[in-house]
Amino acid sequence: MWYEPVPDRRRFLESVSTLSCAVALSGVAPGDVSAQATAPRTAPGQGLRGRPSAQKMVIATEYTVEQEVSVPVVQTAYKGYIEEISQGEIEVELHPGGELGVGGVLVEKLLSGDVHAIQVSLANMAAFVPAIDLVNIPYWCGDNQRFANLITSQAWADEIAPQLAARDLKVLFYYTEDPRTIATRRGVGGPVRTPEDARGLKIRVPGSRVLAEFCSLVGAEPVPIPWGRTLEALKGGEADALDPAGTTLYTAGFIDVLGSISLISSVPDANVYVCNLRWFESLTPEARAALEEASDKAMVESFDVLPGCRAYSDDQLQAQGVDIYQPTEDEMAAWAEAAGEHRPEWDSFKIELAGSLDAFARLKSAAETKGKYTFG
């Protein structure tokens, strides 16, 4: 089972109207939230088929509907899958574009029960469920296929799901926005080709101790900055660089401030849809099964649309003069040698986050073993 990835930019731009991001090509600029885009919300208490007993599901995301053209958040498709597969038993009230907050704010609202489900980066989840930060150890699950292998494996379910459940959280599905990069602001110089080029750079990091350690290993200075302040920090010189995937950088509005993006593919720029476990367990067995099926379909779609989102984002970035640099094989080897998971500096993190070196080895084996899904 799989879909072929969109092979080129032209085909993507021709076919995007059939995807969940169709509204992005309707003349609305990315970053704007229109009344039309958010109109398909069903009134509380009325399911897809007017069922008065429908269970409302409030989902909050960081991206607008229009931004689905450049990032595989698939939120409108997910809403449709949930309502269709549950036959109206679950009614989704979607709050896109950071309407209810971003990053850690969304996680706090989920834990408090103010929302039922959220989309957030794993880096921001790490402050609440530290084991999640394992994916940010460099050069073991950064490429898209290994990430897909890992997060759908039994080893990941055995090691990570119980720690989420302990915080009253249940993952609906994971997705990636491509591997992380090192992106420099204009005026700093670049691109960053090797770890030597990163020395002395002030790199913005989220709430991830592991990403901060990565910066330290390559001689950069990690600067913890909340996501909402990152653009301001770059413009003001508080940070020289940041590490999200190119799709994320374009979608989040960094196009005017960036000079270069180096595709070092260190770790996945991973995201998750996660719900409140108590709320999930309050659903009927049929509704829980429908939500699981809808989540699987949405994950598959996120994998499928990513090549097109990447092509669109790259076109827009390069049109504004951003240099997108692919390191050579030797340069990639230098990054892995300087900060890869084999280094002894990571052992304490592996033991703390995975429980033991053996547990981490099982997770690494899972990442290297082809799973159910093929990532295009």
Image (cartoon, rainbow, N blue to C red):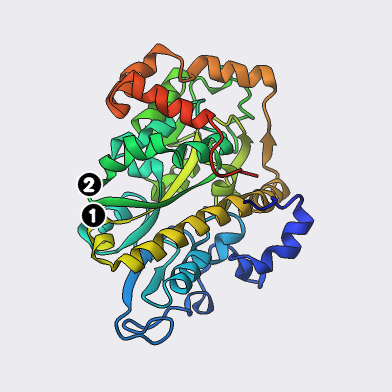
Mark 1 sits on what residue? 111
Amino acid marked by disc 2 = Arg
The reply, left or right, for residue 46 in relation to residue 183 is left
Mark 2 sits on what residue? 167
- Circles 1 and 2, Cβ within 8 Å, touching? The answer is yes
Residue 224: x %, y % from top left: 36, 36
Name the secondary structure under disc 2.
loop
Q: In which quarter of the image is residue 88?
A: bottom left
**Closer to the camera, 275 or 156?**
156
* Picture layout, residue 13 above or below residue 317: below
The reply, left or right, for residue 271 in relation to residue 57 is right
Amino acid marked by disc 1 = Leu
Residue visible at 52% across and 41% down? 148
Residue visible at 37% across and 55% down? 102
**Closer to the camera, 205 or 302?**
302
* Picture layout, residue 336 above or below residue 54: above
* Picture layout, residue 5 above or below residue 86: above
Mark-to-mark CA distance, 1 and 2: 8 Å
Residue 292: x %, y % from top left: 41, 58
The answer to which of marks 1 and 2 sits earlier in the sequence is 1
Name the secondary structure under disc 1.
helix
Q: Which residue lies furthest to the front in this view?
A: 285
The label shown at residue 353 is none
Residue 14: x %, y % from top left: 76, 64
Q: Residue furthest top?
A: 344
Q: Look at discs 1 and 2 and give the one toward the viewer.
A: 2
Q: How crowded is mark 1: few (under 14 residues within 10 Å), some or many (20 or more)?
A: some
User: Which quarter of the rendering shows the C terminus?
Assistant: top right
Q: In which quarter of the image is residue 359?
A: top left
How many numbered marks, from 0 up? 2
